[in-house]
Amino acid sequence: MNKILLPIAYLFSLLFYSCEDSNIAFPNDKSIGEILPINFNYYIHNERMSFPTIEDYAKAIEYLNKDELQEFYSWEKSIKFSSLKRNKENNLSLYAQVQDDIFSSLLNMKGEIEIQGKIFKVNAKDELILVYSEDELLKIDSPTEKYSFGDDVLSEVFDIKSNVEFKDGCAWRDLPDPKGVYYTDYGYDCKYQTQYRKFGIYFTLSAEMWLDGTLPHSVLFISIYKTSYWEWLTKKETVQIGTTISAGNVNHLLKRFYSKAVRLKEYELYVTFTFRDYDNGFYLPVNIANTCQ
């Protein structure tokens, strides 16, 4: 994502505002959960996670998406933030509709987050992102702007320009998520799917498998069987053939290919789902080509 340069006046106002507001707690330079050092700025304001710039928010998503970081609670304990993920019992309906560890770790229990001076609220029921310019408008529920989950909201709100034209196939048309079930002779099923999910300020492309039980010597595999790619703004990533393998005795495997603050322009994803039961010699591969272009 292109770096956003803030006006000098905004930087001074942010500094003054931060010193005056007793609700803000600034973090120290310790690594989160002593796992990975952080490389972005943030603070807690009115029980919301707040990022001074879009770039900081984008880096937070990237940080939480690292394969090495599995324990999201370590993030919250270090910054004393009550996220939607950690407190899902207080808003089960919103959590059920979001169901994403990264995004729900950045939202508070009300589905709010602050980015570059704007407050964004997730209305999952109507699939809307509500934008508020200040807390007083949030209190009376008077958003200054409204966007759908399919909109590239941060690009619209902060006028991020791209010289790439979004193609209709991926920008506006919802494609069915390929999915299915392995039906076996051993009394258990293995479900699989690829999914591109849109939340206006957070977008994720993933592949996922579930086993309806736990077998002591079974393994799940998600593999790229043909060179795949995804493209956003002016950037493109190409991924070569490779495999993600679950640990033994695990009934769920999730592989995120893309998790960012801006929507995809297009993608092609070629995935093989494989379930292997070493006790019974049972082995089932399924190929899925998921293309949006």
Image (tube, helix red, strand yellow):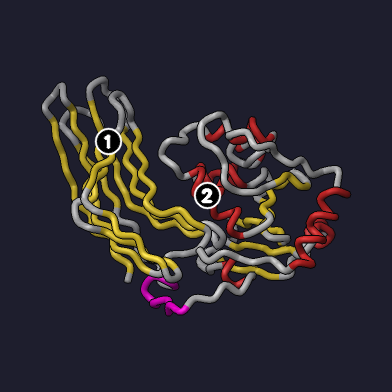
The x, y position of residue 61, in whole percent, is: 52, 49
Q: Nearer the viewer, mark 1 or mark 2?
A: 2
Q: Quick one: 90 or 59, which is closer to the camera? A: 59
- Quadrant housing residue 167: bottom left
Instruction: Measure the alpha-carbon separation of dots 1 and 2.
Output: 23 Å
State the extent of the magenta-drawn residues as a range: 163-171
Q: Quick one: 171 or 115, which is closer to the camera? A: 115
Q: Would residue 152 be counted in the magenta stretch?
A: no
User: Residue drawn at (77%, 64%), measured in percent from left and top?
Assistant: 10
Lower position in the chain sequence, tag 1 or tag 2: 2
Q: Quick one: 21 or 276, which is closer to the camera? A: 21
| In the image: residue 53, left or right of residue 214 | right
Judged from this view, the residue extending furthest toward the left is: 281
The x, y position of residue 96, in whole percent, is: 53, 44
Number of on-image labels: 2
User: Residue drawn at (23%, 27%), measured in percent from left and top?
Assistant: 218
| In the image: residue 51, left or right of residue 97 | right
| Residue 156 position (above or below residue 92) | below
Alpha-carbon neighbours of circle 1 within 10 Å: few (<14), some, or many (≥20)? some
| Residue 203 position (above or below residue 231) | above
To which residue does mark 2 refer?
61
Q: Quadrant of the C terminus?
A: bottom left
Alpha-carbon neighbours of circle 2 within 10 Å: few (<14), some, or many (≥20)? some
Badge 1 marks a residue whose secondary structure is strand
Q: Would residue 167 be counted in the magenta stretch?
A: yes
Q: Which mark is residue 245?
A: 1
Q: Which mark is residue 86?
A: none
| In the image: residue 162, left or right of residue 79 | left
In the rendered structure, which amino acid carries the disc numbered 2? Ile
